[in-house]
Amino acid sequence: MKSFVWVALALCLFAADATAKVRVKDIVSVRGVRDSQLVGYGLVVGLQGSGDTLRNSVFTEQSMQSMLDKMGIAVRAGQMRTRNVAAVIVTADAPAFAGFGARIDATVSSLGDATSLTGGTLIMTQLAGPNGVAFASAQGPVSVTGFAEAGKSESLSQGVPTTGRIAGGAVIERELPGAFDENAPIVLELRNADFHTTVRLADAINAFTARRYGGRLALEQDNRAVVVRRPGGVRAARFIAELGDLLVEPDTPARIVIDARSGTVVIGADVKISPVAVTHGALSVRITETPEVSQPQPMSRGQTVVTSQSSIAAGQEGGQFAVLSGASLKSLVRGLNQIGLKPTGVISILQSIKSAGALQAEIVLQ
């Protein structure tokens, strides 16, 4: 393979040539404005024989008895044999400032030995926050994208049939805690912490507030946060909306991300390599087994047998030296392409160059 093409590298090359200014709202979050995670335990009914085995999932049987008792139906233990019910864990993320009656999506995951949730309906389930207080209730038909079918000698499955989703299936029953303090400063937090980006963000906000409100209102706090004083007579929501449309060019560290399992390599635009000579050769060993028939002599009492003839060949490709020196991302990629390696070979070379001290970047292994 004389050349390799990575979509990630092409994106990096495009970003290196273009002006990488982005909106403030795309790189920061407002401190205190966050989602709330909710969780609950419930039952999915209406399955077509793909639910929990009650003898193996004791909690499913106990939950069914408790549910039927609340409905005024008395069921003695050991009488239920249904396979149409599954115990599930229901999770949801409630967005900030979600008010009473707002609908959010819910994810349903099997807890027992059910084989599929296809066709099931979630019975009303209370969803609680970390403090144990129920903030939402979920109910509705479960949408499952995966499937699993099995016969006597073969089975076929795709996706995960034991996990489903209910779009808009959870309703906020109690307003989540959290609100803007109109008297407190606004703190903008970078999603990717960096001192340089923090300074650029503060400068962009100060340039805007000096022009619009006649004063510099932003102050960089550390490598993640920028504190902004709210001008008088302006609501916090309106002021944050104005700041969100400002353009800032974020700074990115020199970093190489390597996923050795999939052979994916993502190289940042600021990665540099000091001049270094690299050689890479692949040793391959090939063993060929050729069956042969050994025939006995005429009139003899021997037997015809099959023997094997082994042939072993070894070879090593590559081995030529190439000089790499990456003054820019383009020249680095061009030098790696000249060697003609597969992604796995490039991963090995990048790690070796880092060990030699010639790679001026951080390597992140996934």
Image (cartoon, rainbow, N blue to C red):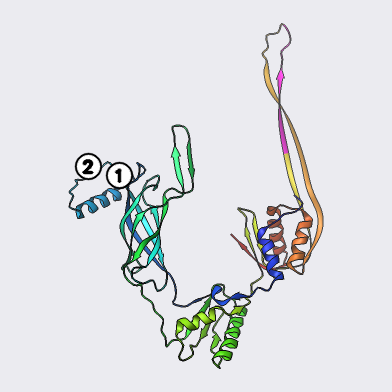
Quadrant of residue 222 within the rendered picture: bottom right
Span shown in magenta: 286-298
Question: How would you classify the magenta stretch by its main secondary structure?
Answer: strand
- Front position in the image: 101 or 337: 101
Please state the horizontal and vertical placement of residue 27, each as a whole percent of the image: 56, 74
Residue that appears at 40% across and 44% down:
115
- Front position in the image: 43 or 265: 43
Q: Is residue 304 visible?
A: yes
Q: Secondary structure at mark 2?
A: loop
Q: Secondary structure at mark 1?
A: loop
Q: Quick check: 366 left or right of 329?
A: left
The Cα–Cα distance between marks 2 and 1, rounded to whole angstroms, is 10 Å
Please state the horizontal and vertical placement of residue 91, each as a whole percent of the image: 39, 60
Please state the horizontal and vertical placement of residue 243, each as a whole percent of the image: 54, 81
Residue 218: in magenta span: no
Vertical order, 331 against 68 (above or below): below
Residue that appears at 44% across and 34% down:
151
Read off the residue under disc 2. 79
Q: Is residue 225 visible?
A: no
Label 2 sits on what residue type? Gln
Residue that appears at 44% across and 85% down:
235
Read off the residue under disc 1. 54
Label 1 sits on what residue type? Leu
